[in-house]
Amino acid sequence: MFDGFWDNILRYFRYFITTLLGVLLNTFAPLAPLFKNPVTSIAVFGLIVGSLVFVTLTLRAMLGLSTI
């Protein structure tokens, strides 16, 4: 009844990893040419860092994890 159970579990895990990598590559591939110019690379890097800080502060405030 449980023949190949762990093989199936491993197969789902590999599917999840490859799907996640595909989504990340398709998301960040259009940004790669922007990193060739120093000015746009600084702007893109600042935008990414700013977005992460914004999401972090928003979630901390929504969840009540800080006194901000």
Image (cartoon, rainbow, N blue to C red):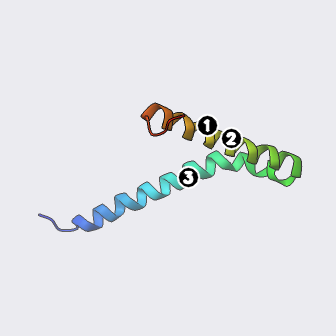
Hey, what amino acid is under mark 3?
Gly
Give me the residue at 46% from left, 58% from top.
17
Q: Earlier in the sequence, mark 2 or mark 3?
A: 3
Q: Quadrant of the N terminus?
A: bottom left
Q: Left or right: where does residue 17 sit relative to residue 56?
A: left
- Residue 46 at what x, y percent from top left? 75, 44
| Residue under label 3 | 22
What is the secondary structure assignment of the residue under circle 3? helix
Q: Which residue is mark 2?
A: 50
Disc 3 crowd rating (10 Å Cα; few below 14, some 14-19, many 20+) is few
Tell whether 34 sits left or right of 27.
Answer: right
Closer to the chain start, of discs 1 and 3, is 3
Q: Quadrant of residue 68?
A: top right
Circle 2 or circle 3, nearest the eye: 2
Determine contact: label 2, label 1, CB under 8 Å. Answer: yes
Name the residue: 54% across, 55% down: 21
Q: Which residue is depicted at the point 68% across and 46% down? A: 49
Q: Quadrant of residue 40?
A: top right
Left or right: where 46 falls relative to 11:
right
Q: Which residue is mark 1?
A: 54
